[in-house]
Image (cartoon, rainbow, N blue to C red):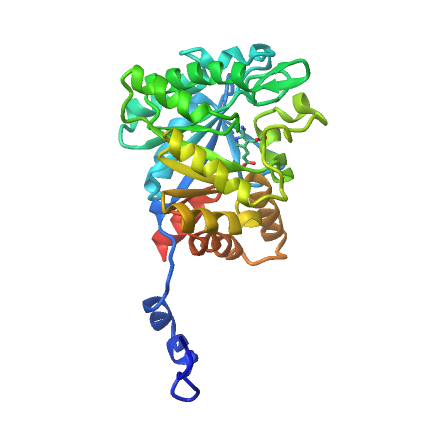
């Protein structure tokens, strides 16, 4: 299609003459509406606590949480994703605390919604922050049992919907869970609860710092999630996963991790044309942030990496840098 646009009739540098022209013809951009801030909430913590493997990221006690949400809203962000760090005495092999309607996350959702009714709350559905073995499901004979796990995920979803979560995000990768959760939500009359499926979630080493953050790393030890999370070698399988989840009632699908899997985001968006999110996971964030803090990389690499998600077709991005980037966009 570019066949007769020869030099000097075509000089592509004309459209790079200055920043206003560059912006005028830009194909993609990032706005605060595209960003979702993940937050770690820790039980019985007063104030905040640093997470060693995630520079600049904190765990928030229940007292400090509302102030942080206020700052996030003031930065221009409308959505947060909540992750619990529960008391280790409450972890067991079934992750039953996940279904307690007054657990840390349900309480936090109610508190946030009371103070800031407009903010969109995304709540993870999976058992790993609640199990003493660190897996996302229930273990039967050394294997994470799919159908038994879904039963508990269903109860977890209902308590989250009841607490007021706008979006429920199963991140567990059990087969069939979207359909069963959707049916349970309909039956309980939560007809507008949005299901964001972590549809293409890879078995990735980039989740390392997150597992430190929610204190599941030690529980998990050397055990692998390969029997439920996707193989790093596959691409067609991601389309199969997404097709299944759409058929079962997902409203939005997500790819995770982000930057090493841009090809997957792009194929999903091209194929299904449905809302597609990307998760710039903890390891991606930490490696960039550490290099920025050391002065080895310019701080702009964070925005550059997020633009790659937009080019690939992502509609929104979960990123630990959401608040900072949103402030930057606002002050530009
Ligand atoms: C748990 C869950 C994980 C992440 C989000 N939800 C970790 C895992 O699957 O082990 C990782 C997010 C990140 O690394 O930032 N189901």
Image quadrant occupied by the C terminus: bottom left
Image quadrant occupied by the N terminus: bottom left
Residue drawn at point x = 53 percent, y = 56 percent = 301
Give how far across and how far down residue 260 sits, in percent: 58, 49
Please state if 295 lies on the left or on the right of 322 as rendered.
right
Name of the residue lying farthest toward the right: 222
In the picture shown, does residue 96 fall above or below 182? above
Residue drawn at point x = 55 percent, y = 17 percent = 130
Taking the image in four quarters, ligand 1 sits in the one at: top right
Give how far across and how far down residue 15 sits, in percent: 38, 76
| Residue 103 visible in the displayed image | yes
Seen from the viewer's position, the closer of residues 110 and 240 is: 240
Q: How many marks?
A: 0
Name of the residue lying farthest toward the bottom: 8
Q: In terms of image quadrants, where is residue 204? A: top right
Give how far across and how far down residue 218 sits, in percent: 68, 23
Residue drawn at point x = 48 percent, y = 44 percent = 321
Seen from the viewer's position, the closer of residues 118 and 135 is: 135
| Residue 280 visible in the displayed image | no
Residue drawn at point x = 45 percent, y = 12 percent = 99
In the picture shown, does residue 88 fall above or below 332? above
Give how far across and how far down residue 151 sits, in percent: 47, 14
Seen from the viewer's position, the closer of residues 131 and 80 is: 131
In the picture shown, does residue 74 fall above or below 162? below
Please state if 81 lies on the left or on the right of 231 as rendered.
left
In the picture shown, does residue 313 fall above or below 318? below
Q: In terms of image quadrants, where is residue 203? A: top right
């Amino acid at each position: 299609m570019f066949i007769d646009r020869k030099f000097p009739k075509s000089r592509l540098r004309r459209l790079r003459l200055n920043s206003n022209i560059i912006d005028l013809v830009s194909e993609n951009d990032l706005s605060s509406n595209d960003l979702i801030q993940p937050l770690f909430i820790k039980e019985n913590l007063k104030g905040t606590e640093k997470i060693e493997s995630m520079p600049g990221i904190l765990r928030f006690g229940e007292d400090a949480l509302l102030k942080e949400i206020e700052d996030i809203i003031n930065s221009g962000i409308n959505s947060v994703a909540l992750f619990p760090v529960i008391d280790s005495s409450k972890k067991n092999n079934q992750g039953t605390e996940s279904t307690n309607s007054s657990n840390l996350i349900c309480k936090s959702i109610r508190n946030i919604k009371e103070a800031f009714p407009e903010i969109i709350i995304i709540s993870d559905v999976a058992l790993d922050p609640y199990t003493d073995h660190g897996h996302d499901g229930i273990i039967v004979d050394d294997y994470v049992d799919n159908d038994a796990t879904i039963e508990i995920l269903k109860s977890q979803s209902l308590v989250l919907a009841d607490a007021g979560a706008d979006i429920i995000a199963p991140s567990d990768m059990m087969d069939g869970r979207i359909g069963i959760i959707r049916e349970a939500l309909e039956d309980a009359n939560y007809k507008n609860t949005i299901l964001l499926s972590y549809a293409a979630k890879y078995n990735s080493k980039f989740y390392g710092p997150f597992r430190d953050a929610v204190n599941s790393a030690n529980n998990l030890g050397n055990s692998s999630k390969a029997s439920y999370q996707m193989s790093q070698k596959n691409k067609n399988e991601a389309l199969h996963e997404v097709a299944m989840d759409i058929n079962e009632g997902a409203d939005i699908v997500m790819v995770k991790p982000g930057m090493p899997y841009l090809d997957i985001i792009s194929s999903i968006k091209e194929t299904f044309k449905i809302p597609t999110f990307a998760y710039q996971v903890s390891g991606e964030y930490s490696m960039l942030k550490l290099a920025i803090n050391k002065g080895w990389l310019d701080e702009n690499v964070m925005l550059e990496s997020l633009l790659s998600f937009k080019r690939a077709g992502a509609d929104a991005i979960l990123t630990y840098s959401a608040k900072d980037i949103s402030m930057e966009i606002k002050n530009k």
